[in-house]
Image (cartoon, helix red, strand yellow):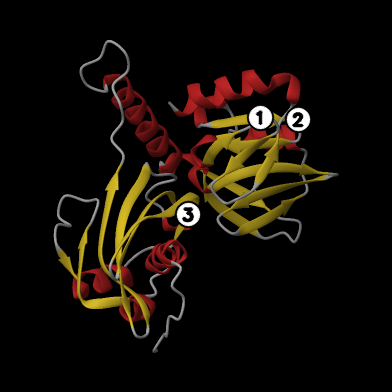
Amino acid sequence: MVVRIDSYDAPALTEAFMEHYYQGDADWLDASTTDDFVCLGAQSDQFLLTKADVLSLCREMPHVLMSSKMYRQSARVGDVRVVDGRFMGFLAPEEGSMAFAAEQRLTALWRETDEGLRMFHIHVSNAMSEPEEGERFPIKFATKAMQYINLVSLQKHYLNQIEVVDIDGVYHMLRLFDVISVEAKRQDVLVRYGYTTIRVHEGIAKLAERIGLNAGNGFVQVHRSFWVNVLYVETVDGESVHLATGELVPIAQRRRREIINQIQSVRG
């Protein structure tokens, strides 16, 4: 597939580049980069990757959800444009290995051609956590990271598989890690996992007790009709919990501070 890029909007093209990369669209990347394209990736073994290397990685890439995106053109020299950006990458839940990642930062270099802008260099990195006051190294952050890893392991353990029967009588075997949120809907309950929603004819309190929705297993009740898996919580504002899937879950206003503290305590 040949993709012609007519736009000279470097920030928009950079955002599109990352989206297509994490969607496994190697054809788009091939058409939008120069033959001498070089990449410095965020992982230790991704130093001076060639165009062929990046296209190969792209084809093997699991689907990643992206949020908190920001891209801006920071410089233009001759026919070269420099774009700085950042984003949060969330692996789609069914892919399995993680629920959220640290902030990613990047610098992309684009060159003007007769066919539009073409990227010839990109450098992607992970933001390093700052030590807290009185620390030489980010020890508290490391402790929280270990708490997160332990929680992921707990939710993925085979002993924590749960059985859910939908209103059509179909049995679903899930891990706690698969469950993103649980919402009461009149006489039923909606169990969301991945891009799927199961409607269950069962009270939310009974279901929550039966399948283990509690702080010990990484779940917080943010509203009387809503439980969320803290591994999928991105941010909390004055009115809602923002999940990695893009869903906004209303929170009980009188419990806002309590809910935020619970999420931080459970997730680490």
Circles 1 and 2, Cβ within 8 Å, touching? The answer is yes
Q: Nearer the viewer, mark 3 or mark 1?
A: 3
Residue under pointer 1: 221
Q: Which residue is mark 2?
A: 224
- Please name the residue that numbered disc 3 is placed on: 66
Classify mark 3: helix, strand or loop: strand
Q: Quadrant of the C terminus?
A: top left
Q: Amino acid at mark 2?
A: Arg
**Residue placed at 31% from the left, 13% from the top?**
133
* Residue 249 x, y percent position in the rendering: 68, 40
Q: Residue furthest front?
A: 78
Local packing at callout 1 (Cα closer than 10 Å; few below 14, some 14-19, many 20+) is many
The residue positioned farthest toward the bottom in the image shown: 1
Say which quadrant the N terminus sits in.
bottom left
Q: Is residue 198 visible?
A: yes
Q: Are the residues at dot 2 and dot 3 in contact (C-beta closer than 8 Å)? A: no
On screen, 147 above or below 5? above
